[in-house]
């Protein structure tokens, strides 16, 4: 039996802990890394923007188009090679520099592409039209309302358009003028955000390589919300769902992962679909794996415990409240529109492998080879060390999730159900490219360590790393320059007519690179249409007016409420697109102007204040497009005989072929 003295001898009282040391410079630098990276990237972007203005870069001039591609390609390659050289002695600094330089390169290239125009990417071409319309709406009001229909809550994730609109309101710009600067800023930040999320997953240097190369290869500067979320969602998913971490990295708390998830959901939501499918596959894989017998007799712990998953989900839902609450409210209060998100593309559900002949895809084949090699090593029981197997397994499950989503889309198409599954092809390519960069970095690292251990030809893998990184960076820069800087999105932005009728390129008689849908370049400009409306109805401000029109330039740059969207895919899920078309067809069939006025004033949707329609022969026509699932869209229109809109209930001003009509009280 032990005595108290003996107990004291065997279990001495531990000494008090030493006083907390003052945080060192590395700890401070780690905490401040995001701010320092952003500050450095913004400073570099500002310098390049000053040079673009000083040199008066203009891509509408063939001389500049011929210059910019080789210059940006060379700069990108040299920057990549320089980062690889520095990485030998200062890997952390090189990684940070690589991410910053990627942001500066994107900022410089996109600023050069849009220098001289106030439009964002694509002007008013395709999706750029409704995105500009969103900014115009939020420049008028901070409320989360639909960009087209009056009285409906927002259905599109609001963050990007809201920031653009509020920036316009603060700087006294028109909403459409705020699209470009925010697009350029987001482009600079995309590789930095991706890098900060990839760093705890794969380590500093692989993270910088993925963030710099993959975000440029998969660049979508005209859709910065989709680009940002796609670049960030994969590393977030690996952290949250697969708990993949580089050696020495602590597990992220659930609240932090939830905040990131919520912020991404505020920006864009489609990419949650393929990664949601990947999550289901991952949980199923873990469940099967836990049931399999192990040599040590112990079951592996779950990668995503239920309590942790719930905490991430709750925090994410709270942060993303502005995205999903309006949708729930609309679903509860209004009938749903059967046409929404039924747009599709023939062949959009096919599994398309990366092409070795496409500079922005070739790395995806390396990714497939690396996954196959890792699986072969795992089957042979070879220890690859570090987090190689968890990382390869997580990336493999992400690939399977994208493939499964495409196959689900193909099956749903047979049942006449569409949910934009074809967009997952972009996600699949991004995952394969990221896997290729990670795999190449892994193989290079193994080659270098092997050469150093044998003390033979250690210079060879180092040289190979510099050459490979330089070539990959040049490839990414060339893709950015050739496809985006001098491509059709930039040229369209340079040749689309402003609301006042002037043209960025300075030639009002020059044809637009791609015409704006339903707008004839010879039509009177938007400012004339606005003036005509104010003359007819000075008592109804444009931001309160409901107009029957598909003049895309008017809708995108003026905060009017459209009675009908010019594309069914752009209609609110509760907008009742088909029913609105039927009502307008009834108006066109009316025997008298009194009948037409009564239907327009008193209907179950919106009280119409006026119409802005082009004249075609003896009729006024409202053109629009309707989804023809699964075959993209078809054009359609509603025709109004001139006599129906000419009675005492209406007054009008004719501007060439465009007729502005107001209903009298």
Image (cartoon, rainbow, N blue to C red):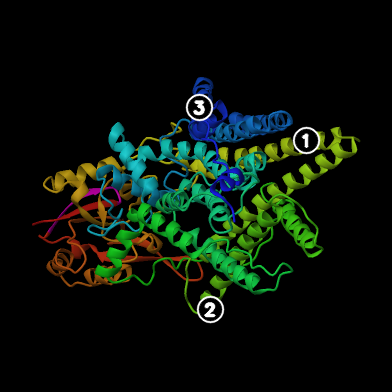
Q: Percent from the top left, x then y, of residue 236?
A: 53, 52
**Disc 1 and disc 2: Cα gap in Å?**
48 Å
Q: Earlier in the sequence, mark 3 or mark 2?
A: 3
Residue occupied by mark 3 = 22
Foreground: disc 3 or disc 2: 3
Residue occupied by mark 1 = 467
**Disc 1 and disc 3: Cα gap in Å?**
42 Å
Q: Residues within 10 Å of mark 2 (few under 14, many from 20)?
A: few
Query: Which quadrant would the C terminus be assigned to in this image?
Result: bottom left
Residue at (33% x, 56% y) in the render? 550
Q: Earlier in the sequence, mark 1 or mark 3?
A: 3
Between 89 and 79, the one nearer to me in the picture = 89
Q: Are marks 1 and 2 in contact (CB under 8 Å)?
A: no
Mainly helix, strand or loop, the magenta region?
Answer: strand
Residue occupied by mark 2 = 414
Q: Are marks 1 and 3 in contact (CB under 8 Å)?
A: no
| Horizontal relation, residue 122 to residue 557: left or right | right
Q: Magenta span covers which residues? A: 650-657
As drawn, which residue projects farthest toward the bottom?
Answer: 415
């Amino acid at each position: 039996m032990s005595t108290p003295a003996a107990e004291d001898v065997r279990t001495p009282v531990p000494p008090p802990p030493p006083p907390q040391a003052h945080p060192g410079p590395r700890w401070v630098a780690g905490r401040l890394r995001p701010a320092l990276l952003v500050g450095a990237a913004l400073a570099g972007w500002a310098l390049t923007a000053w040079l673009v203005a000083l040199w008066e870069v203009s891509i509408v001039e063939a001389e500049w188009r011929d210059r910019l591609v080789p210059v940006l390609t060379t700069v990108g390659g040299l920057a990549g090679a320089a980062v690889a050289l520095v990485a030998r002695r200062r890997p952390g600094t090189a990684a940070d520099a690589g991410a910053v330089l990627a942001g500066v390169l994107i900022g410089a290239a996109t600023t050069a592409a849009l220098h001289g125009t106030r439009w964002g990417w694509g002007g008013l071409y395709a999706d750029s039209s409704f995105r500009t319309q969103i900014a115009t709406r939020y420049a008028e009001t901070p409320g989360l309302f639909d960009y087209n229909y009056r009285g409906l809550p927002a259905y599109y994730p609001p963050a990007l358009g809201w920031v653009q609109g509020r920036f316009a309101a603060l700087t006294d710009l028109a909403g459409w003028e705020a699209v470009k600067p925010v697009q350029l800023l987001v482009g600079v930040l995309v590789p930095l955000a991706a890098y900060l999320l990839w760093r705890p997953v794969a380590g500093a240097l692989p993270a910088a390589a993925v963030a710099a190369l993959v975000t440029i290869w998969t660049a979508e500067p005209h859709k910065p919300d989709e680009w940002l979320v796609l670049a960030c969602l994969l590393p977030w998913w690996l952290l949250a769902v697969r708990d993949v971490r580089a050696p020495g990295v602590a597990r992220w708390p659930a609240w932090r992962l939830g905040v990131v998830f919520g912020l991404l959901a505020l920006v864009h939501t489609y990419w949650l679909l393929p990664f949601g499918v990947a999550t289901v596959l991952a949980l199923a894989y873990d469940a099967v794996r836990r049931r399999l017998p192990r040599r040590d007799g112990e079951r592996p712990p779950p990668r995503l415990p239920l309590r942790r998953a719930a905490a991430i989900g709750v925090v994410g839902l709270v942060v993303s409240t502005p995205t999903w609450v309006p949708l729930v409210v609309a679903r509860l209060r209004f009938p749903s529109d059967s046409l929404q998100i039924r747009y599709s593309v023939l062949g959009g559900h096919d599994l398309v492998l990366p092409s070795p002949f496409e500079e922005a895809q070739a790395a995806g084949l390396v990714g497939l080879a690396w996954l196959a090699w890792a699986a072969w090593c795992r089957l042979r029981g070879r220890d690859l060390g570090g987090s190689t197997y968890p990382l390869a397994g997580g990336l493999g499950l992400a690939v399977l999730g994208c493939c499964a989503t495409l196959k689900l889309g193909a099956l749903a198409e047979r049942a006449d159900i569409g949910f934009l599954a074809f967009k997952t092809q972009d996600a699949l390519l991004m995952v394969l490219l990221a896997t290729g960069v990670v795999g190449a970095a892994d193989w290079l690292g193994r080659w270098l360590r092997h050469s150093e251990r044998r003390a033979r030809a250690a210079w060879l893998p180092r040289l190979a790393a510099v050459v490979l990184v330089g070539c990959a960076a040049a490839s990414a820069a060339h893709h950015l320059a050739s496809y985006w800087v001098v491509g059709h999105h930039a040229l369209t932005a340079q040749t689309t007519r402003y609301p006042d009728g002037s043209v960025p390129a300075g030639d009002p008689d020059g044809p637009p690179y791609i015409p704006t849908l339903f707008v004839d370049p010879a039509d009177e400009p938007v400012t004339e249409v606005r003036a005509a409306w104010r003359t007819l109805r000075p008592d109804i401000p444009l931001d309160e007016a409901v107009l029957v029109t598909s003049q895309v330039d008017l809708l995108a740059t003026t905060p009017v409420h459209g009675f009908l969207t010019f594309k069914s895919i752009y209609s609110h899920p509760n907008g009742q697109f088909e029913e609105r078309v039927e009502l307008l067809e009834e108006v066109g069939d009316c025997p008298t102007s009194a009948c037409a006025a009564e239907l327009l004033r008193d209907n179950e949707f919106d009280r119409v204040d006026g119409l802005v329609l082009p004249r075609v022969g003896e009729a006024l026509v409202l053109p629009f497009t309707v989804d023809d699932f699964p075959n993209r869209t078809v054009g359609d229109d509603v025709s109004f005989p001139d006599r129906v809109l000419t009675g005492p209930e209406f007054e009008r001003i004719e501007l060439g072929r465009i007729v502005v009509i107001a209903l009298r009280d």
